[in-house]
Structures are given as C-alpha cells and as structure tokens.
Image: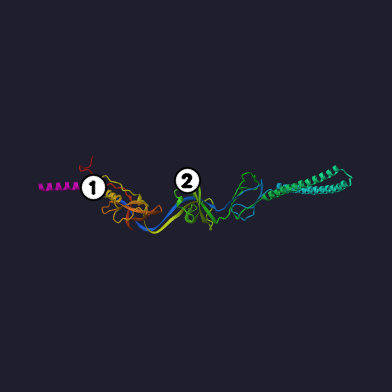
Amino acid sequence: MKKIAVLVILLVAALGAVGYFYFKKPPKAQYKTQKAERGSIVSTVSATGTLNAVVTVQVGTQVSGTISKLYVDFNSLVRKGQPIAQIDPALFTSAVQQARGNALNAEAGLARAKVTAGDAKRTMGRNRQLLADGIISQSDMDAAQTAYDSALTGIRAAQAQVLQTRGALKQAETNLNYATIRSPVDGTVVSRNVDVGQTVAASFQTPTLFTIAQDLTKMQIDTSVDESDISRLQVGQRANFTVDSYPELQFEGAVVQIRNAPVVTQNVVTYVVVIGVSNQDMKLKPGMTANVSVQIQRKDDVLKIPSAALRFKPKRGKDDKGGTEERAVRGERGAPKPGAPAGAGEKGPSQRLYLLNGQGKPVPVPVLTGITDGGFVEVTGGAIKENDEVIVEQLAEKKASGMGSPMGPRF
C-alpha cells in the first residue's frame, strides 16, 4: 500500500512537471498569408486637377459708361457677334455728331483753299503777261507768285485737316460701336459680373464683364504632377478620373499636353499636365476637382503578389538564434539558390519575401519584381510560383493560459 502511494505521488509530480513546461512553452508565431496569383497589373500616376473649358474667353469693355441693357444671363448660349450688353450710347452718339461736323467743316476748308489757289494762279498768269508788256514791275510779279505758292500750301494744310477730322470721326463711331458689347465666340456664358445701372471703366486693365466658355462638350483637366513622375508621362496615354459630384462614375480622358514650365510651391516642383476630356452628356462643369490616374503601363496574365509581402519582415523571438532564416539569408546573399533564374538582377530590382517552411517558420525567398499598381507587384523571376502562400503580416501572439506556479496560487 505504501509503495502504491509513492507511485501515485511520483506520477502526479511527473504530470505536473510536464504540464508546467508545456504551458510555459512560448506560443508559436502565427502569420497571415496570401496566394501568389495571375492577373492584370496597371501601373498608374495619380494627380489632382481642376476641370476647365478648353477655350475660355473673358469679355471686357473698351469704353467707359453705364450699363443700360443686358441681353444674356448665366448659362445663356451665345453666337459670335451677338450683343450681350449695352452701355448707354448717348455720349458716344454726341461725339459722333460732333466729329462728323468737324469733318464737314474741314472738307469745306479744303474746298475754300482750292478756290483761293485757283484765283492766285489766274492772277499770276495775268501778271506774267503784264510783266512781259512792261506794265508792272518784277516785284508785283513776285508778289503774285508768292500768293500762289501760299495758296498751294493752304490746300495741303486743309487736306491734313480733313484727314485728321475723318480719323476723329472714325474713332467716335468705333467708340459708339464698342458701346454694344458683343460675344467674341460661340459658347456658353459661365459668369456675369455686371448688372444694369452699374458703371464700368475702361482702364489699363480691362474689367471682366462676362466669362464665356467656347465649347463645354470638350473640356480639359489641368493637373499638377510631381517631378519624380513627370518622366513617365507621354502624350496620348489614357487617364481615368473621378469627381466628387459623381463618386460612383469613372470618366475617361487622355494626356494632350505636358508643359515644360515648372511650378514651384514651397520648394516642391511640379509640372502641369493637361488631360483632354469629352463631356457630351454635360455632367462635368468648370471648376470641379478631379482625381486623375494616368495609365503608364498595363500587363495581363502575369504572376503578381501583394505589395505587403515585400514590406513584411519577421519579428525575432527571444530564443531565435537566427538558425534557418539566417542561413537562408546568407544563402540568398551568396550563391544563387537552386531554381533561381539565371542572370538575377538583370530583369528588374531584386527584393525579398517570405514563405512558410515545413516547420511553419518564415523563409526568405529572393524575387525579381516589375511594375506595380500600389496593391500588387509583378513577379518577373525568382523561386516562387502561382498559388504559393506568401506572408503579408505577422499576427499578434496570444499568451498561453498557464497552470500557475508549481507551489500553487499565492494568497
């Protein structure tokens, strides 16, 4: 009986020791994985811009006065040459009448100068005959010649006066014509900055009375692209964009212009890239903010992995001496692994991801990568194939619920 009790005590002690060391064993690391798969990858450049009409004309005034009539309003469709506003023409009409009177007076002065010149010419002819007959002296003949030359000069002065008054008349008529403000293009009025009774002044900087968009069915997006991405863009590349008004819709466009003038804002250099957009359904409006993605390159049916797999680095545990993983890293940095593509590093940048081995530990694998769309990266070479589980994240370790101290709970 005593032997049985000793055996029972030893068995309980052994089970307690095994249980203690089992529950005190560090928990096994857990990893989140995702399969390498085949599919399409589209490399893009993202930018933000503003929608504008391709041609926008700011209509001002070339004469000063008071707005007496408005013929159009916001969103009005206008034709080239159509009156859109009228400045009070009373002063300009009076100026035309005055200029016309001055022109008539100058023409009458020209006619009077011609009559005077004709009379002086006849007098000079008579005096020449009288001088030949010895009736008058040479001084009388010289006086007649001088009068004739003076009359010719008077004709030229009168002609100059006629030209001057005609120019003043034309200017007055032009100002009268400018009193009627007309549309310079076919388009849509997108803004009106004046009302009837408002006085406008034509100065060095002409005030903007109307803004007319020539054709709202064709628009453009003026985007700002960072200098690090500008070399990847080319005219003709496709672009997709969204606007806040229609977040569920994807609109399409194309790169039509890459401007060389840099824009420096707080030491950040950007370049303006113009995206041409069709707006046949008139959903897009000037001034909308567009989030643009320009398609740089597209590849179909390629092996791709999550971008997170290339960012993953395993956490080293307390008892981890580097064993398998460190040897794998040394193998990667040394001679190429069996199965690795020849000439590694020649097809693209070499990076490293991790797979799980038979013991559930992460093992580094070198791969060659290609284009990326932000979420996935193309694999162009390396010891990885379709459906391989790549590690993208290490999950938080859960503490094991131990059996407590061998001495029992503390009180």
In the picture shown, does residue 123 fall above or below 254? above
Q: Which residues are magenta?
A: 1-20
Inspect the image, locate mark 1, and give the three-letter code of the amino acid beneath it. Answer: Phe
**Magenta stretch, main secondary structure class:** helix
Indicate the position of residue 54 as horizontal and vertical percent values: 55, 53
Which residue corresponds to mark 1? 23
Q: State how many labels appear.
A: 2
Residue under pointer 2: 269
Q: Is residue 366 visible?
A: yes
In this view, the residue in front, 392 or 294, is: 294
Give, as a three-letter code, the residue at label 2: Val
Residue density around tag 1, few if under 14, some if 14–19, many if 20 or more, within 10 Å:
some
For residue 83, side relative to residue 359 (left or right): right
Badge 2 element:
strand
Residue 303 appears left or right of 256:
left
Residue at the spot 49% in from the left edge and 44% down from the top edge: 264
Q: Earlier in the sequence, mark 1 or mark 2?
A: 1
**In this figure, which colouring scheme has been used for the structure?**
rainbow
Q: Residues within 10 Å of mark 2 (few under 14, many from 20)?
A: some
